[in-house]
């Protein structure tokens, strides 16, 4: 299986041909005359995107998503690798469970599936899961998270951080103090939550946990990753911790970069997400932090839900929204177009850095001879109206439905194999 991509521009602005054979970039001079070609004139070739935070729902919740449908959505969005969150049924809290998810990924995936291991058994926050066994498993787990829930017990969090330091693992924390923002909290605490009569979720419920965790990471001399940063206070604390030399990384979701809390005004549960959508001052703080590197990476928190799980009163419906297919579009719209991020900066935050946080060696690599052929061809000028009906996901809780956004992804190639090709693409041999 070989392929010649002609005339593509890389993120640094140079134009070149890319020859792919056996899953690896080779010297274009070695391409045979009859090789299959993709004309990429006018397109950018970027390294395949890597997501640190994906809910694939399989095993256990296949009505909402499967590893097949979720990774097909990932390929549609330009991703060649996703980290699968542990809150499935059963929970990924043993080596066997992690190997099972990785095997399903190898069988059904349109992208590489890297299992995330739970920090605590059955996500109960009481007893550490088999972190070492998962790290030594075939799945080679390096990222651990109880996401959906916060590891609230300080001693347990300290022990988890200490434990994973031995194999350079990382604890990815869903920062939510359950006393300040309990299970019912569903709206940014503000004038809006008061007026709508929805339980408030103050930004400090996030930032107080981050303030604790960065100090525990320092104490344990270990790596902390902060999931879905949503507030200005959180950004300030992460900035302080980095200045101090603490090993902390952080992610921002596309929805916290783009969508405001006013969208919940008519109680549309599509816009219910945890942590909730915030006000413009917090959106601006998250954008600024992503631009200056305080927030290291973009991660989707892609969270598919069936209509049955969303079709409830706002305070009862499940939180979460889709993200994989429009993540790149939102980052282009909010960061690249306004000049806050170059294409090289985008590649850092959506490919190189997430792969490094996950300790992956075969993803997040430059487009160069000898490197794995993970690449996304991007039309920087294409736009389209988002149609949730056209989604590759099994679910339809797409918060961008009806908006005109960039529609950049033309072709996605994972390990030399075309995993997505836009209907408009022409390919010849
Ligand atoms: Zn979360």
Image (spheres, rainbow, N blue to C red):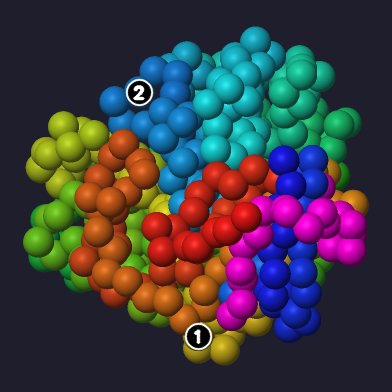
Of 150 and 72, nearer the camera is 72
Question: Mark 1 vs mark 2: which is more N-terminal?
Answer: 2
Secondary element type, mark 1: loop
Mark number for residue 99? none
Q: Is residue 153 left or right of residue 278?
A: right
Asked if residue 113 is among those painted magenta in the image, a careful observer would answer: no
Q: Is residue 167 left or right of residue 88?
A: right
Of 95 and 283, nearer the camera is 95
Q: Residue at x 41, y 28 (%)?
A: 66
Residue 11 vertical position relative to residue 212 in the rendered view, above or below:
below
Q: Residue at x 56, y 69 (%)?
A: 378
Mark number for residue 337? 1
Q: Residue at x 44, y 38 (%)?
A: 70
Tell me if the residue at label 1 has its CB under 8 Å from ligand 1.
Answer: no
Residue 234 vertical position relative to residue 11 in the rendered view, above or below:
above
From mark 1 to mark 2, how far is it between C-alphas? 37 Å
**Crowding at label 2, few (<14), some or many (≥20) Cα neighbours within 10 Å?**
some
Question: Are the residues flagged by discs 1 and 2 in contact, CB closer than 8 Å?
Answer: no
Q: Residue 9: which quarter of the image?
A: bottom right
Q: Residue furthest top?
A: 96
Magenta-highlighted residues: 24-42
Mark number for residue 61? 2
Q: Residue furthest front?
A: 34
Of 283 and 111, nearer the camera is 111
């Amino acid at each position: 299986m070989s392929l010649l991509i002609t005339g593509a521009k890389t993120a640094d602005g140079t134009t070149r041909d890319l020859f792919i054979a056996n899953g690896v970039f080779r010297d274009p001079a070695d391409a045979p005359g009859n090789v299959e070609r993709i004309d990429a004139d006018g397109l950018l070739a970027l390294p395949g995107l890597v997501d640190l935070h994906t809910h694939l729902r399989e095993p256990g919740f296949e009505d909402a998503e499967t590893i097949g449908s979720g990774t097909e959505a990932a390929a549609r969005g330009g991703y060649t690798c996703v980290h699968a969150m542990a809150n499935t049924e059963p929970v990924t809290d043993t080596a066997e469970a992690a190997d099972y998810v990785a095997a399903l990924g190898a069988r059904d995936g349109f992208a590489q599936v890297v299992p995330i291991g739970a920090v605590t058994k059955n996500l109960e926050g009481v007893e550490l899961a088999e972190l070492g066994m998962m790290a030594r498993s075939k799945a080679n787990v390096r990222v651990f998270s109880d996401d959906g829930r916060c590891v609230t017990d300080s001693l347990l969090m300290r022990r988890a951080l200490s434990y994973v330091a031995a194999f350079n693992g990382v604890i990815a924390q869903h920062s939510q103090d359950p006393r300040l923002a309990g299970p019912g909290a569903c709206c940014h605490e503000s004038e809006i939550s008061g007026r709508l009569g929805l339980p408030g979720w103050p930004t400090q419920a996030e930032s107080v946990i981050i303030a604790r965790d960065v100090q525990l990471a320092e104490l344990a001399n270990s790596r902390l990753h902060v999931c879905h940063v949503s507030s200005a206070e959180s950004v300030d604390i992460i900035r302080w911790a980095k200045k101090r030399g603490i090993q902390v990384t952080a992610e921002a979701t596309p929805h916290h970069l783009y969508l405001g809390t006013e969208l919940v005004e008519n109680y549309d549960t599509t816009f219910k997400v945890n942590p909730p959508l915030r006000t413009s001052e917090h959106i601006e703080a998250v954008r600024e932090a992503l631009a200056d590197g305080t927030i290291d990476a973009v991660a989707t928190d892609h969270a598919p839900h069936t209509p049955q799980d969303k079709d409830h009163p706002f305070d009862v419906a499940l939180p979460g929204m889709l993200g994989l297919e429009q993540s790149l579009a939102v980052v282009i719209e909010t960061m690249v177009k306004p000049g806050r991020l170059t294409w090289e900066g985008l590649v850092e935050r959506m490919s190189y850095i997430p792969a490094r946080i996950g300790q992956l060696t075969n993803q997040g690599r430059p487009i160069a001879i000898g490197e794995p052929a993970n690449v996304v061809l991007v039309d920087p000028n294409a736009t389209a109206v988002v149609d949730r009906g056209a989604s590759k996901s099994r679910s339809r809780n797409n918060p961008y439905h009806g908006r005109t956004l960039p529609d950049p992804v033309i072709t996605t190639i994972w390990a030399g194999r075309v995993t997505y090709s836009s209907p408009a693409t022409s390919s010849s041999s």
